[in-house]
């Protein structure tokens, strides 16, 4: 176990170093209910772990000596840096940098009988977990999931039996706790086989609740999760928080599409006209933006309230509403039915396509279902796009 | 997740009740309450809620469950 976790070289992380004043304050705040006299010890203990070329992560509170060497004990409360990184992660900025070094951590005052909670090394997952454990003492075993959350990593095979067994061995877990039990988040079950982990490491996997905030209740209930803790949810907030990345992922293809739109819009009776490209191009880009807003934001957020099961169909419904609004807004600038129809259809197709794309992000769509939906709707979308392009070019010749 | 359901009659989940040894692990790992224990055996109670994540398949000690997403 390395004692000082390299925290990444990013500029915004550089102030996370060993500033005793700030870490002192944090320590006091999170030491409520414990012996306050050890706060000075803590500072010394932290200073002991300074190493050239390494930076202590801001979430480390102190180190605990165990039979398997010193283990970093982390804070439960989130600091300013953590909230800042949350914002970045949600918008998909430098996503890969928001990782936690894999290995064993502790929270509270973990001892030989404390539970071992397994998690992913995605910073938000890690933050979520520690935030849920303000008055709990436990060990936290962070697997190397390449900075991806538990569920996605389990699907991709990085949150796996192999990785779990390897980490248990690497950190000599048997020297740290007297029991033979690890608590794996239920959503990790897609990548983990409890039987195989037991066979290979001797540790028994107990599946914990889906949501970190249910962990204290799970402990109180003798490590049993009730039905509610076992079922995924996909609330309005959960859907909303996923939309920034959806929109951001759509931006690059949208820029390329916009270029094409300007070119296509320039075609007219006199060959290519720059004024046409500009004026009509802007209109079509507006239709594109409407479609992105409708399919990438509104449809995901309002998902259960829009009729039909197929996401592509939901996207068409929302898309129509916004396309009508668009028509009302720009009708003075468009001449004739062909042009209006073209923009209407185009905005609809974008909305439908992006809504369909969202099937990849939800926790309830089966791959077989997605395949069926795509087989049905992609031809429709392609046909509508072709008609829309035809109409748009025609409308320039009037 | 009552209000959010995806397509019906597409899930490829199959349970061989003969092979089931009644450990109830599948009811623990499934995020959509697809299984219930009935007379010490697992039984599929909500097939259409299955998202083919494979958690049950991975953890069933007797190989009684299968899913084949993307086939058919
Ligand atoms: S594949 Fe996943 S959703 Fe389907 S029954 Fe198994 S655990 Fe439940
Ligand atoms: S996991 Fe397998 S053996 Fe255990 S109850 Fe489910 S089907 Fe039966």
Image (cartoon, grey):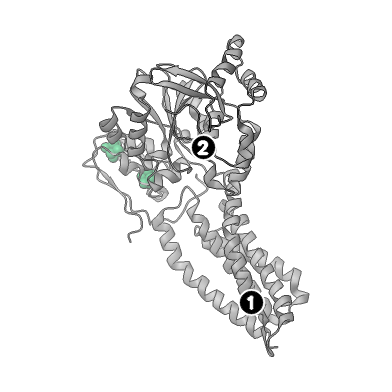
**x, y percent for residue A196:** 28, 36
Furthest residue toward left: B18
Q: Chain of mark 1?
A: A
Image position of A39 with respect to A200: above or below: above
Q: Nearer the viewer, mark 2 or mark 1?
A: 2
In the figure, is residue A329 to the left or right of A65? right
Query: Judging from the image, what secondary structure is the residue with disc 2 in?
Result: helix
Density class for disc 1 (Cα within 10 Å; few <14, some 14-19, many ≥20) is many
Residue A277 image-quadrant placement: bottom right
The location of residue A232, given as percent across then percent down, is 48, 41
Chain ID at mark 2: A
Residue A68, placed above or below residue B37: above
Give the percent coordinates (x, y) of residue A65: 45, 17
Q: Front-most of A273 and A290? A: A273
Residues under numbered marks 2 and 1 in contact, where contact means CB atoms less than 8 Å apart: no
Name the residue tied to disc 2: A125
The residue that disc 1 covers is A342
Residue at the far front in the pictured view: A52
Residue A81 appears in the figure: yes
Q: Is residue A308 visible?
A: no
Question: Which quadrant contains ligand 2?
Answer: top left
In this rendering, would A208 be left or right of A326? left
Counting from the top left corner in percent of width and height, residue A50 is at 54, 25
Q: Is residue A263 left or right of residue A366?
A: right
Label 2 vs 1, first from the N-terminus: 2
Q: Note whether ligand 1 is within 8 Å of mark 2.
A: no
């Amino acid at each position: 176990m390395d004692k000082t976790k390299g925290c990444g070289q990013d500029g915004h992380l550089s102030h996370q170093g060993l500033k005793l004043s700030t870490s002192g304050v944090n320590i006091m705040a999170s030491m409520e209910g414990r012996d306050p006299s050890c706060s000075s010890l803590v500072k010394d203990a932290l200073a002991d772990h300074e190493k050239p070329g390494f930076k202590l992560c801001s979430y480390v509170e102190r180190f605990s000596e165990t039979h398997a060497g010193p283990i970093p004990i982390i804070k439960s409360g989130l600091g300013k840096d953590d909230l800042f990184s949350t914002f970045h992660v949600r918008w998909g900025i430098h996503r890969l940098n928001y990782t936690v070094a894999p290995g064993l951590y502790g929270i509270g005052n973990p001892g030989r009988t404390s539970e071992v909670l397994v998690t992913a090394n995605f910073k938000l997952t890690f933050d979520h977990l520690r935030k849920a454990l303000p008055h709990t003492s436990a060990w936290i075993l962070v697997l190397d999931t390449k900075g991806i959350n538990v569920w996605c990593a389990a699907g991709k095979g990085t949150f796996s039996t192999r990785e779990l067994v390897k980490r248990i061995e690497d950190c000599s877990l048997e020297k740290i706790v007297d029991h033979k039990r690890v608590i794996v988040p239920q959503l990790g079950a897609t990548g983990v086989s409890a039987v195989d982990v037991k066979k290979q490491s001797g540790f028994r996997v107990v599946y914990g609740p889906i949501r970190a905030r249910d962990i204290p209740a799970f402990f109180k209930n003798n490590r049993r999760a009730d039905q509610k803790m076992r079922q995924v949810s996909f609330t309005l907030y959960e859907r909303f928080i996923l939309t920034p990345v959806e929109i951001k992922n759509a931006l690059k293809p949208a820029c390329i599409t916009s270029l094409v739109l300007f070119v296509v819009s320039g075609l007219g009776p006199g060959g290519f006209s720059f004024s046409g490209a500009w004026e009509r191009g802007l209109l079509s880009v507006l239709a594109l933006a409407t479609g992105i807003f409708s399919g990438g934001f509104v449809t995901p957020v309002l998902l259960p309230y829009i009729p039909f099961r197929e996401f592509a169909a939901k996207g068409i419904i929302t898309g129509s509403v916004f396309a009508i609004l668009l028509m009302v807004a720009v009708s003075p600038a468009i001449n004739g039915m062909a042009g209006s129809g073209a923009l209407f259809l185009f905005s609809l197709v974008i909305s439908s396509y992006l809504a369909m794309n969202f099937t990849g992000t939800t926790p309830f769509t089966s791959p077989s279902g997605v395949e069926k939906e795509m087989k049905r709707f992609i031809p429709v979308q392609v046909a509508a796009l072709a008609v829309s392009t035809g109409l748009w070019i025609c409308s320039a010749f009037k | 997740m009552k209000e959010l359901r995806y397509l019906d009659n597409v899930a490829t989940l199959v349970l061989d009740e003969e092979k089931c040894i009644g450990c109830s692990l599948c009811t623990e790992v499934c995020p959509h309450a697809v299984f219930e224990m009935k007379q010490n055996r697992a039984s599929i109670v909500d097939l259409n809620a299955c998202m083919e994540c494979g958690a049950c398949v991975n953890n069933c000690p007797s190989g009684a469950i299968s899913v084949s997403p993307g086939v058919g």
